[in-house]
Amino acid sequence: MDVVTNPKTLELANETVSYLKSQLPETLQKPRVAIVCGSGLGGLADTIEAEPKVELSYSNIPNFPQSTVQGHAGKVVFGLMGEQKLPVAVFVGRAHFYEGHSMHLVTFATRVCKVLGVETMIVTNAAGGLNESYAVGDIVCLNDHLNLPGFAGINPLRGPNIDEFGVRFPPLSDAYDLELRRLTHRAWKKLGLDQQKRRLHEGVYAYLVGPTYETRAECRMLRTMGADLVGMSTVPEIVVARHAGMRVLAFSLVTNCAVLEAGPKGYDEAIQAMSKEELHDFLSKGKANHQEVLDAGREAAKDMQALVKQILCEYAEI
């Protein structure tokens, strides 16, 4: 699997941007903010004003990877948002490393955003909750991450550095913009969302490549390491965004609660009299599946949309 930066990335990004600008009116050619929608969160594109609005399929955009995951529509929507008419680009769906894409392609849209002139990226995902205080449907504003594949050399910046994007050794201690996180909590309260059941947290996201969900032992390991959430995306995009000097705000929607307790032993007295079906049900309790990810996304979509829209209304005035 190729994990080395394509030396022609800048050339390819410029080619893609030329195509995009040829499809856009002048008012939409330089979005200030890009929003990446994770599984089940594509409704964020609905926050864009009706006119002017341009929707482009990834399949028609030169050099773009194609998403194959259910819940990822595979399109980018350009438009204006809020009373301030903030120009934005909303990416409905993303490419994942587990689909067989190289890291170059997984992060290509992020580099296209930089060439377009994007200042800030808002990145969303669906994630499993490791923190036992989190409930399904809660929203977590990320304040740090664990890049587990990066420990093994799977890093989107591996290979020759592209100086036009950023420095060879970019710091990530400031990856998650503190001003934008402060703005997020203020927007949550301003909308009155703090008065409802769904909660807003801050937490640490652990990135694994997937596509398998984590074992019980892996979940316990990640929790011990300080992770509050676990998922299969987002971190490569954040690494590349920060390398390129863009500000980052990231959200996880908790779509399932990870199973942290150890599984039963084959000699446990409690299972000796169970049938085959009962054993299966006993072990499957709490098992994650992609459908519940999509279902939780739909239920939380309205709050997530309202929050992002409010954030951008206030961001436009910064």
Image: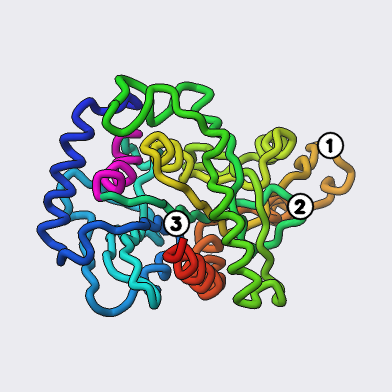
Which residue is under mark 2? Answer: 132
Label 1 environment density (alpha carbons within 10 Å; few <14, some 14–19, many ≥20): few
Residue 176 image position (x, y, % from top left): 54, 45
Q: Residue at x 38, y 31 (%)?
A: 156
What type of secondary structure mainly makes up the magenta span? helix
| Identity, as a three-letter code, of the amino acid under mark 3 | Gly
* Mark 3 or 1, nearer chain start: 3
- Does the magenta run of residues contain 249? no
Please indicate, yes or no, whether residue 86 appears anywhere in the rendered image.
Answer: yes
| Mark 1, secondary structure of its residue | loop
| Identity, as a three-letter code, of the amino acid under mark 1 | Tyr
Residue 37 image position (x, y, % from top left): 42, 59
Which residue is under mark 3? Answer: 38
Question: Decide: marks 2, 1 in contact (CB < 8 A)?
Answer: no
Residue 154 sits in quarter: top left
Residue 110 sits in quarter: top left
| Mark 3, secondary structure of its residue | loop
Cα–Cα span, label 2 and label 1: 28 Å
Tell me the mark number nearer the camera, choosing from 2 and 1. Answer: 2
Q: Residue at x 22, y 25 (%)?
A: 7
Which residue is under mark 1? Answer: 267
First to last magenta residue range = 103-116
Query: Is 150 placed above or below 45 here?
Result: above
Residue 290 image position (x, y, % from top left): 51, 57
